């Protein structure tokens, strides 16, 4: 059965359509969503069956935590613990934007979402559709890229439907993402400082400059 395609305006998301997508996520469905980098797989992170479905679909290692999309810095503080000036500097400089920060998870998140690491990866995307959905949902949604293992990431709804249309019940078509570069991932949980796990849209040099400021 083909997925339901929900077309939402990328700059001014229609509230009724946002509500419609949020209801699907509340029902435990996996939804393909556009972000500022690639299309992602959104589920409710506290619905453990929905979380398991992502791990199974992507054949993702169970020791790799899922990244979460949030709406603002305040939400990061609700979901995390022991945040410090390094987090504040990077969040102020690069959020919203293609930066994922790995921080220590708070007690509100299930251990399965953190892959039993006690850490969580957070990002505030510079895209209106996912932020509107998170805002209406009232808590984060997962943000892992919408592609099968070893397959290319999807930058539009057409490529996403071609790759995962046989398993996704709903795809939000917000047009092309406009980039083929992933987020930069910075680990802030280390006692010896910070570490760039993946250099993506934000260069390592820019991260270092922000943390020196």
Image (tube, rainbow, N blue to C red):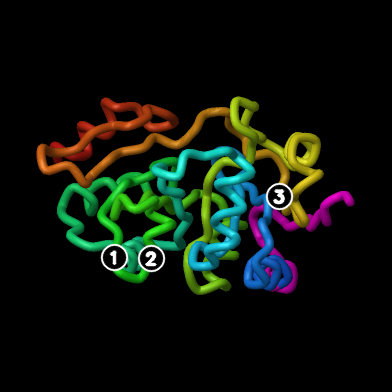
Q: For mark 3, give the secondary structure.
A: loop
Circles 2, 1 touching at the beta carbon (< 8 Å): yes
- Mark on residue 160? none
Q: Nearer the viewer, mark 3 or mark 1?
A: 1
The residue sitting at the left extreme is 192
Q: Position of residue 20 (x, y in %)?
A: 73, 70
- Within the magenta stretch, is there residue 10? yes
On screen, residue 120 versus residue 29, left or right, reads: left
Q: Magenta residues, as a range? A: 1-19
For the point 60% across and 45% down, the residue is 56
For discs 2 and 3, the disc positioned in front in the rendered view: 2
Residue 191 left/right relative to 24: left
Q: Position of residue 194 (x, y in %)?
A: 19, 38
Secondary structure at numbered mark 2:
loop
Could you tell whether 35 is left or right of 75 in the image?
right
Task: Report the residue marked by disc 2.
Answer: 109
Residue 91 visible in the picture: no
Characterize the local packing of mark 2: few (<14), some (14-19) or many (20 or more) Cα atoms within 10 angstroms: some
The front one of 42 and 60 is 60
Q: Position of residue 67 (x, y in %)?
A: 45, 49
Q: Is residue 191 magenta?
A: no
Q: CA distance from mark 2 to mark 3?
A: 29 Å
Which disc, if any, is residue 106?
Answer: 1
**Tag on residue 174?**
3
Element under disc 1: loop
Asked whether residue 88 appears in the rendered view, the answer is: yes
Dot placed on the residue nearer the N-terminal end, 3 or 1: 1
The Cα atoms of the two marked residues, 3 and 1, are separated by 32 Å
């Amino acid at each position: 059965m083909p997925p339901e395609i929900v077309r939402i305006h990328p700059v001014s998301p229609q509230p009724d359509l946002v509500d419609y997508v949020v209801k699907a996520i509340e029902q435990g469905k996996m939804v393909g969503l556009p972000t500022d980098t690639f299309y992602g797989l959104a589920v409710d992170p506290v619905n453990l069956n929905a979380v398991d479905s992502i791990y199974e679909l992507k054949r993702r290692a169970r020791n790799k935590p899922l990244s979460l999309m949030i709406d603002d810095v305040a939400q990061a503080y609700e979901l995390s613990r022991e945040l410090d000036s390094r987090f504040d500097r990077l969040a102020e400089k690069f959020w919203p934007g293609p930066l994922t920060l790995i921080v220590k998870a708070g007690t509100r998140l299930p251990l399965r979402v953190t892959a039993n690491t006690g850490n969580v990866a957070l990002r505030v995307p510079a895209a209106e559709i996912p932020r509107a959905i998170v805002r209406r949902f009232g808590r984060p949604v997962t943000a892992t890229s919408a592609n099968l293992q070893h397959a290319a990431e999807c930058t539009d709804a057409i490529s996403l439907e071609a790759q995962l249309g046989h398993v996704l019940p709903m795809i939000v078509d917000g047009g092309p993402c406009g980039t083929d570069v992933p987020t930069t991932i910075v680990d802030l949980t280390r006692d010896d400082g910070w570490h760039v796990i993946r250099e993506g849209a934000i260069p390592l040099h820019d991260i270092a400059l922000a943390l020196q400021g």
